[in-house]
Amino acid sequence: MTVPRAEQQLPPAGAPAGTRIGFWTCTALVVGNVIGMGIFVLPSSLAPFGFNALIGWVIVLAGCLALARVFSHLAHALPAAGGPYGYIRQTLGEPSAYLALWAYWVSMWLTNAALATGVVGYLVVVFPPLGALSPAPFALGLLGAVVAINLFGVRTGGGVQIVTTALKLLPMLAIALLGGWLLLTAPASYTAHPPTTPLSLGGVTASATIALFAMLGIESASLPAARVDDPARTIPRATMTGTVLAATVYIIVSAVPLLLIRQHELAEANAPFALLMDRYAVAGAGRWLALFVVVSGLGALNGWTLLAGELTRTMAERGVLPAALARNNRHGAPTVALLVTGALAAAMIAMSYSKSLVAAFTFITRVVTAANLPLYLCCSLALLVLWRRRSTGCTSRRVLLAASASLLFVVLAFVGIGREPFVYALGLIAAGLPLYAVMRLRRRADPSAEVLPP
């Protein structure tokens, strides 16, 4: 599908100045959404792979930096596109944009269901009397509270994101300082019992897949593009800054426990950071770390709720979701979109308690990872199209290198993720086709159904 030139020149969405967000909020969205609850169990997940995990992290870091450059170039070249949906639509056509963003949209409220469920589990550790409450209504209450916060507008939700992101980095800083202190005072601790798993291609690929899930969310700054001040400048800076910061944190907090705790012991630890702090710093630190897990989970839940509302509104404005989802309240928040995505996440929460927490979380994370890859693939191809068109700002070899590197990385991720999650992703995409067909027929019958931003 060729997008008319007039649409390619759309001005940025006319959001009042009070409803816009800047560099720090966008950076907090990237860091806060990338660093969720998984980081607190990630060292245990990667421990069985030994040093393969560190090699996997290097590969993922390189791939994610390439992807971050892709989103940065797209935001600079198409500041009026309104985010990834517009990037893909203006280069690959509407069907590709819809299918990629539909799978991504589903993954967002699946993520929120997993986060709300996980937060409840850790809250019981911090405040044991809460264990007397039924977990499902408690999780639903947390989800409802976060939706309510975002109904007051993107700046309110963004302010909460800045605070929770700053708080969640404190335990990461503690781990980094502990690692540095031990390196200076007891360097032999790092060589006392190194991992014994031999290096292998399979080990690197498997650990890289786990690490990739941990880095999902690097595109967060571009999703609310219509609400960002000076998106051509703010989004690229926030995307690169947030990606580098999040990756640095992940590598440090993955390497320190791997080198200081015996491999088999770390692999069996339910709370690897608490184990590390109890052994080398302060005994009884587990409960305090659980509090930060709660803060981290709530921050990620808030960030993904905000972005789910923004993406839903964007797709409704483009006419591929019902127009009612594009309605805003007096605070500029997409009321119906937030309520609908909240309700879908609530349904998943109710379903998740029919399984064990670990089984539900594992299943959801694999599906979410697979559902994100079509978006990354299409955005990489979108940048290649802009380079071939010689679009403004996309003529250099650096643009070609970023697009090619990210495309290779996504293809390798598809191979590494395995057959089952790939089938799940295809199923998610197929589930959205009937709605797309209905909305397309409706627009043909009523051209005014596409409610583009003013």
Image (cartoon, helix red, strand yellow):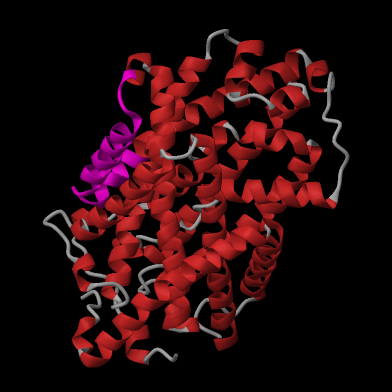
Determine whether 62 is above or below 190 in the image: below
Residue 7 versus residue 44: which sits nearer the camera? 44
Q: Quadrant of the C terminus?
A: bottom left
Judged left or right of residue 218, residue 255 is right
Q: Residue at x 40, y 32 (%)?
A: 119
User: Above or below — where is 402 with respect to 290?
Assistant: below
Q: Position of residue 141 (x, y in %)?
A: 26, 36
Q: 241 or 95: nearer the eye? A: 95
Q: Residue furthest front?
A: 354
Q: What is the quadrant of residue 395 in the picture? A: bottom right
Residue 69 at least partly seen = no
Residue in view at x 35 percent, y 56 percent: 308
Asked whether residue 143 is drawn in magenta, I would say: yes
Q: Is residue 288 left or right of residue 59?
A: left
Does the image show residue 158?
Answer: yes
Q: Residue placed farthest to the top in the image?
A: 283
The location of residue 162, given as percent across then percent down, is: 36, 39
Give the dominant element type of the magenta stretch: helix, strand or loop.
helix
Locate residue 189: give its quadrant: top right
- Residue 71 located left or right of residue 222: right
The answer to if 253 sits in the magenta stretch is: no
Q: Residue 8, how many percent across, how many down?
A: 37, 84
Which residue is at the far left?
Answer: 330
Front-lying residue, 381 or 344: 344
Q: Residue at x 61, y 40 (%)?
A: 248
Residue at image location 61% in from the left, 22% down from the top:
177
Q: Position of residue 138 (x, y in %)?
A: 30, 32
**Figure quadrant of the N terminus:** bottom left
How many numbered markers are drawn? 0
Residue 291 lies, with reference to residue 247, above or below; the image says: above
Q: Specify the segment rendered in magenta.
A: 132-161
